[in-house]
Amino acid sequence: MTDATRPDKEVPAKRWINDNESDSDQEIGLFGGGNKLRVPKALAEETELIKEGKKHTVVKRKRRFLEDDGSDEDDPYTMINIEDILSPIETPTDIVQRPALRRILKSNQIDALAGTAMEFIEGEKNFNKVLCRLSSILHQDDPQYLDLDLNVKDDADDLEDAVKKETGESAADTAASEVVRHVKELLLENINYSNEYLARLQGARDKLTKARLQKDALYTELQSQLTDQRRPSAAPRRQ
């Protein structure tokens, strides 16, 4: 069979993509993928609205459902009050009276972010300790490795002079000394990067903690104002 008459075989990756697309087309409206809030087709329909040259998809209730007076239990939009959601705030206490806005002040997302930042800080500190310990060993500053002899000169000129004078140091020893010197430079560079990263993480966590405290203080103050507004005013005294 020639190449011209040979049927094209689907690549496994391409076949998987095609199967996945067909499954997603059949299951749309039943599972997630951005369709969790999609209303059943029996209650609503999608129409296209063209305004100022732009096409918009609009979800609206079917006229047949409105005329038949369908059950409110079947309508997922019954408990949604658009006016409460989109109406502007008239007083600061409206924030604690509206569930959507109150949920923002009561959210624990800032605490979660602060906790995640703390986990990053702890992990980076452990990594920083390892780098500092290795640097101390290579510089012979660690008490447990004082007898470690790396045979590395402090100055490059001294090393070159030692090689030129043929002090008995072999080419392998020279290469090892260069490797140790390069490792020391990389360690110092990474320690500086790690310290800068820790400082930025700590600064971010401090700001998150400050934002959480301010958010809690704002919620407490608004609740206090709302309580004062609902409290009946005292009757004026007679003179």
Image: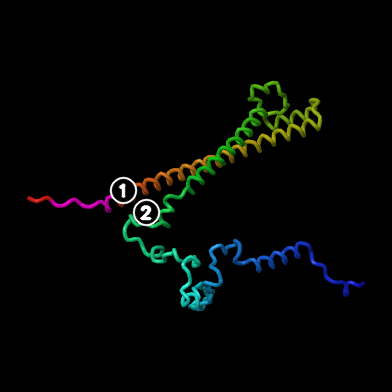
Residue visible at 77% across and 32% down? 174
Magenta stretch: includes residue 231: yes
Q: Position of residue 114 (x, y in %)?
A: 50, 44
Q: Nearer the viewer, residue 2 or 183?
A: 2
Among the 4 quarters of the image, the one containing residue 143: top right
Report the quarter where the N terminus lies: bottom right
* Residue at screen point 48% across, 65% down: 73
Gap in Å between the C-alphas at discs 2 and 1?
Answer: 10 Å
Q: Earlier in the sequence, mark 2 or mark 1?
A: 2
Of helix, strand and loop, which mostly describes the magenta segment? loop
- Magenta region: which residues? 227-236
Q: Amino acid at mark 2?
A: Val
User: With respect to residue 117, does 138 lie above or below?
Assistant: above
State left or right for residue 30 relative to residue 228. Answer: right
Tell me: residue 221, above or below residue 7. Answer: above
Could you tell me which secondary element the residue under label 2 belongs to? helix
Viewer-proximal residue among 194 and 72: 72
- Residue position marked by numbered label 2 in the rendering: 96
The residue that mark 1 highlights is 224
Tag 1 secondary structure: helix
Left or right side of 89 for 7? right
- Percent position of residue 31, x then y: 61, 62
- Which image quadrant is residue 181 in? top right
What amino acid type should be assigned to the residue bearing mark 1?
Answer: Ser
Labelled pair 2, 1 in contact (Cβ < 8 Å): no
For image coordinates 72% across by 27% down, the residue present is: 150
Residue 165 within the magenta-colored segment of the rendering: no
Badge 1: residue crowd in 10 Å (few <14, some 14–19, many ≥20): few
Q: In the drawing, does residue 140 fall left or right of residue 238?
A: right
Residue shown at the point (41%, 44%) measured from the top left? 213
